[in-house]
Amino acid sequence: MSRYGRAACVAVLLAALVGVNASSASAEPATSVSYPQAASATRFNGLAFDACDAPSLTAMRAWESSPYGGVGVYIGGPNRTCAQRNLTAPWVSTVSREGWRLIPIYMGSQAPCTTRPNSVEFTAATASARGTTEAADAVTRAKALGMLPGSAIYGDVEHYTPTDSACRTAVLAYVSSWTKELHRQGYLAGIYAGLNSGALHLSQAYNSTSTARPDALWIARWDEISALTGWAGIPNTHWANHQRGKQYRGDHDETYGGVTINIDNDRFDAPVATVAHSYLQRGSTVVSARRGPTTSNTIAKRYEPGATVQVICQTAGSKVGSSTVWDLLADGYYVPDYYISTPSNTGYSRPLPRCTYPYQVISSALYERTGPGTGYAVARTLYAGGLAWVSCQRSGTRVGTSAVWDRLEYGNFVSDYYVATPSSTTYSRPPIPRC
């Protein structure tokens, strides 16, 4: 029996040890994510904007004087309207290197009761299959743009008639299939939806064992209030751990650096696109790329002086030179950052994210502890569906069928038994390194 089915049987016994409420989740709603070795999530917290057409590089550079740090881009879908002449892999690479975080949007088929005119729609009969095929297409398009596994892709579910129960059921089927296919291919599943229709219905089905829950929710509510909590009808415990965005103002013009763009306003604290960045190997030393971020890991390949490497993210490892930072490369191997031409050779470098692998919590509540065991102090609580942003794994107190504990990116630990990682008994590799 998997940990998902087992959870109800052991929850009462473990509640006192781990701090878990007695209720539990099955494989749905919290499905696992099949991250490949060369993957990592990226999170953005701040103001963003989205425009129908991706702005030119000139415009993006002019808008570096704006308050925005993120930009929504429409990567595909049968209902995408603008031509996207600027949205290419070089554009994605350049604006990401210059510090912008990208929010991939896929304008897929719409609900059979959508209020959006002239839309390609799914039906009750086709909703599930369409969710799968469109998620697969979204992944293909994201990869072509250089958006790597671990990225979140947001399916755009426009407003629909919320009182139509058959339509509601079809939307949930579409979103469930969308989520499972993205997870199967190593991507996080986001949904953009109206507060009073899709977002509300997803929240009502949050703990449904017949619906796979998306990892992040981006609502549309044009009230000019950017708050990411206090959403009507959606408890603050739903999508609670860096999993929310809000589009709080609709179409209007703004001007920065002499360039005017018609935009929507967004506030984000959620996963976005992961993009690799090119750097050179510095110095005259041949650098060994290893299968983990320590010098004790086996050597997988070597890079000659001056070689170009594609860095996905950075993580902590054994000290080399003046730095304990290691770089995960697009080939899935690690190199000491000390030998790479990132901005710093002593610490972490922007715009590179930390290497993290988010998975949903499968219990109704789970304590984060200050160390890898039930005897450590409780630091905070994660709720069902909250993302555990895992950076590495190590052994600790046995809980259920597992002695593995997950170290979160900010240093706390949770029992891996109650996180939707691929294994409920042992370490989940690839790609999570050992601590």
Image (tube, rainbow, N blue to C red):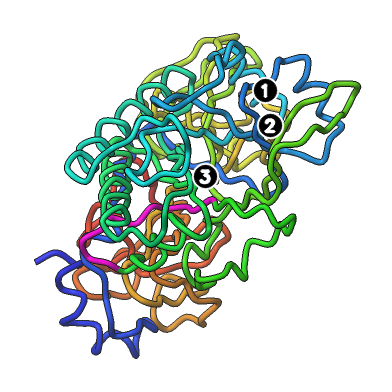
- Crowding at dot 2, Cα within 10 Å, few <14 / some 14-19 / many 20+, comes out as many
Are the residues at dot 3 and dot 1 in contact (C-beta closer than 8 Å)?
A: no
Position in image of residue 318 (x %, y %): 52, 44
Q: Main secondary structure of the magenta part?
A: loop
Callout 3 secondary element: strand
Q: Which residue is mark 3?
A: 317
Position in image of residue 209 (x %, y %): 22, 65
Q: Which residue is mark 1?
A: 95
Position in image of residue 346 (x %, y %): 71, 38
Check the image and name the residue furthest to the right.
258
Count of numbered marks = 3
Q: Is residue 328 above or below residue 369?
A: above
Specify the segment rendered in magenta.
208-218
- Crowding at dot 1, Cα within 10 Å, few <14 / some 14-19 / many 20+, comes out as some
**Residue type, mark 2 in image:** Trp
Check the image and name the residue furthest to the left.
1
Discs 3/1, front:
1
- Regarding residue 293, the answer to whether it shows in the image is no
Callout 2 secondary element: loop
The mark nearer the N terminus, 2 or 3, is 2
**Residue 250, picture quadrant:** top right
Q: Is residue 169 above or below residue 405?
A: above
Q: Does 54 appear in magenta?
A: no
- The quarter of the picture where the C terminus appears is bottom left
- Regarding residue 239, the answer to whether it shows in the image is yes
**Residue 120, picture quadrant:** top left
Q: Residue at x 76, y 39 (%)?
A: 68
Q: Which residue is mark 2?
A: 100
Real-space Cα distance between discs 3 and 1? 29 Å
**Residue type, mark 1 in image:** Val
Q: Is residue 411 above or below residue 328?
A: below
